[in-house]
Amino acid sequence: MKKTARMAAQAPKIPAARGDAGTGADAQVLQELRPGQSVELLKELHILTREGRLNQDSRRKLKQVYHLFQFIEPLLREFAQDEQAPTLADHGAGKSYLGFILYDLFFRELGRGHIYGIETRAELVERSQALAQRLGFGRMSFLALSVADSMQADVLPARFDVVTALHACDTATDDAIAFGLAKQARAMVLVPCCQAEVASCLRQNKALALARTPLAELWRHPLHTRELGSQLTNVLRCLYLEASGYQVTVTELVGWEHSMKNELIVARHTGQRKRSAAERLRAILAEFGLERDLGPRFGLAGDGSVNAGEDGAVVQGVQA
């Protein structure tokens, strides 16, 4: 697994934001916006106030989205070569801050490609649809679908270039990964959040585990259980992606000083399934007694093999 401690440069402060007719923004605020950014869009998203100012919370939110943009934009630009029309699915889109800003800064100028915002809350989908229509963002679609339904929906392409999931809580990140594998995504950009499932499984197995191995001391105390559960969850996700044919980079989202949920997983499809990743995935599940509860989620079959990959190929855990 490829890891880097930090991968980010601060967003450039260039006074070239796009001031739409009838709008304005504080001069200092304009310095914080990316080149070509629509002031009107940021007001519609309530990131800017009506007077064109940023409060502390919206400044943090904008900084986070801009930082993610720095990872996603190069992928989209690569996939847009040779007049291709890149497609992006944003899972758990919420109010679609990320999708709208990606469209405004990349898709609008490109003139082709499509963003699909997938969200289970119908009221947020309706609000995003109305905003896209008002702004003339014609290549944005919003769907009120669960992950399971989105995998089968005829209105979605059979394949996607990029799948994103920003602050997808608990198992929602795993759902986004499952969607990305099913749609043969060329890249996935994931920011996990609130990973509680593994911690819950560790607590259930605590009595047995404490008697079995000294490693169980790592989750004897509730705080350590929660932290270890979060760490384990993301390690398992990365191994599963590698076993499924992706090159994985894990990095910190610089600039998220006020959030502990600052881990970013970027996965690029290579088609090279790592046998060692499948073996380690299986071994970690066994070591922590998680095969029964989490094995199916991470493709662990009853015979100990790992079902990894969009075509359903089985990567054997121990055979050469």
Image (spheres, helix red, strand yellow):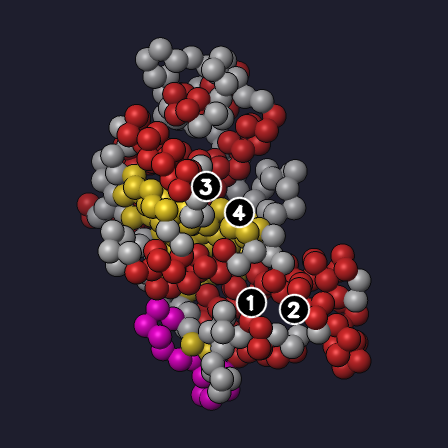
Residue appearing at x 38%, y 64% in the figure? 181
Considering the whole magenta stretch, tell me its main secondary structure.
loop
As measured in the structure, the alpha-carbon distance from the residue carrying label 4 to the one carrying label 3 is 10 Å
Secondary structure under badge 1?
A: helix
Question: Decide: marks 2, 1 in contact (CB < 8 A)?
Answer: no
Secondary structure under badge 2?
A: helix
Q: Position of residue 258 (x, y in %)?
A: 65, 38
As measured in the structure, the alpha-carbon distance from the residue carrying label 3 to the one carrying label 1 is 26 Å
Q: Position of residue 196 (x, y in %)?
A: 63, 58
Camera-near label (2 vs 1) is: 2
Q: Identify residue for label 3.
A: 94
Q: Identify residue for label 4.
A: 167
**Label 4 neighbourhood size at 10 Å, few (<14), some (14-19), many (20+)?**
many
**Label 3 neighbourhood size at 10 Å, few (<14), some (14-19), many (20+)?**
many
Looking at the picture, does residue 210 appear above or below residue 70?
below
Residue appearing at x 48%, y 52% in the figure? 190
Is residue 145 in view?
A: yes
